[in-house]
């Protein structure tokens, strides 16, 4: 499948274009491309470190992120790895090998995210450095996403990013309320961007960062993806954030 936009990281773009559909999951190529571009932007700015994902499943999105790691960086995969059966962890490892990811840089936690403290995350990754990216796609309840946000916030790099999956999804309409409540309690954090859905399955993602880090990414996203930039943006009461979508358009008024 040929895609019209790329992250600029050859290994990521090859995986997303050639192998993405061979790993079951629901994250979109579009979201993976934008997120890998953000990791490239971090590396270009010298923002290095670790990444983590809650809700890895077979590894579709995780493998894209792993291809964006720099030498010596590690990625933590957090999942129960028991659905649809207990063979999921072996399948995940098979996908890693088949898609060119060296498991030496991968740390796996087979269990729930609520078992982990910030200290546990640092210990598993073997570093006190902040995480430059934390992707949350875990249990879809208000309580769980709040808990996972607290965990990510506690371990993130000062210029790091938190990516939230299944935002604005019609199947999980209350998740965005939990995120809004969390942001109200954390005024240091803002929504940097919304990566729009491709369809009802491959739902939108919110990209969060500290307010003082927005300028590091915002203009770059608009300049790097002009054909995917929804120019009206998204209103979050006191500010607007970038919206990127595969086919930006405005509704026609008859």
Image (spheres, rainbow, N blue to C red):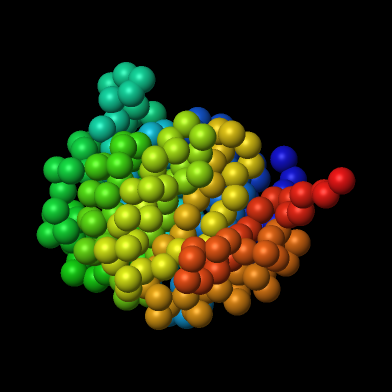
- The quarter of the rendered structure image containing the N terminus is top right
Residue 174 image position (x, y, % from top left): 39, 40
Closer to the camera, 242 or 235?
A: 235
* Residue under the point 54% across and 57% down: 194
* Relative horizontal placement of residue 83, taking residue 101 as reference (left or right): left
Above or below 168: residue 128? below
Closer to the camera, 145 or 123?
A: 145
Residue 188 image position (x, y, % from top left): 32, 73
Above or below 120: residue 141? above
Residue 184 image position (x, y, % from top left): 32, 63
Picture quadrant where residue 59 is located: top left
* Residue under the point 30% across and 46% down: 145
Above or below 246: residue 21? above
* Residue under the point 77% across and 49% down: 251
The answer, for residue 225, to whether it is visible in the render is: no
Residue ranking furthest to the front? 254
* Relative horizontal placement of residue 199, taking residue 180 as reference (left or right): right
Above or below 240: residue 250? above
């Amino acid at each position: 499948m040929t895609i019209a936009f790329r992250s600029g990281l050859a290994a990521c773009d090859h995986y997303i274009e050639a192998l993405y559909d061979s790993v079951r999951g629901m994250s979109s190529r579009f979201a993976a491309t934008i997120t890998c571009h953000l990791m490239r932007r971090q590396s270009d700015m010298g923002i290095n470190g670790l990444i983590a994902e809650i809700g890895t499943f077979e590894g579709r999105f995780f493998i894209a992120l792993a291809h964006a790691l720099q030498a010596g960086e590690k990625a933590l995969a957090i999942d129960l790895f028991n659905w649809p059966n207990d063979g999921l962890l072996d399948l995940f490892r098979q996908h890693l090998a088949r898609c060119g990811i060296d498991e030496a840089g991968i740390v796996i936690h087979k269990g729930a995210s609520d078992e982990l403290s910030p200290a546990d995350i640092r210990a598993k990754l073997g570093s006190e450095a902040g995480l430059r990216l934390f992707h949350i796609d875990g249990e879809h309840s208000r309580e769980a996403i709040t808990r996972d946000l607290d965990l990510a916030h506690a371990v993130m790099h000062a210029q790091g990013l938190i990516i939230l999956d299944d935002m604005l999804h019609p199947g999980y309409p209350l998740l965005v309320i939990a995120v809004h409540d969390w942001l109200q309690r954390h005024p240091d954090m803002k929504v940097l961007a919304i990566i729009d859905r491709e369809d009802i399955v491959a739902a939108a993602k919110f990209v969060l960062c500290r307010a003082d880090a927005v300028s590091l990414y915002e203009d770059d996203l608009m300049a790097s993806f002009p054909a995917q930039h929804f120019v009206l943006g998204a209103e979050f009461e006191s500010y607007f954030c970038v919206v990127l979508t595969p086919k930006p358009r405005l509704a026609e008024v008859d």
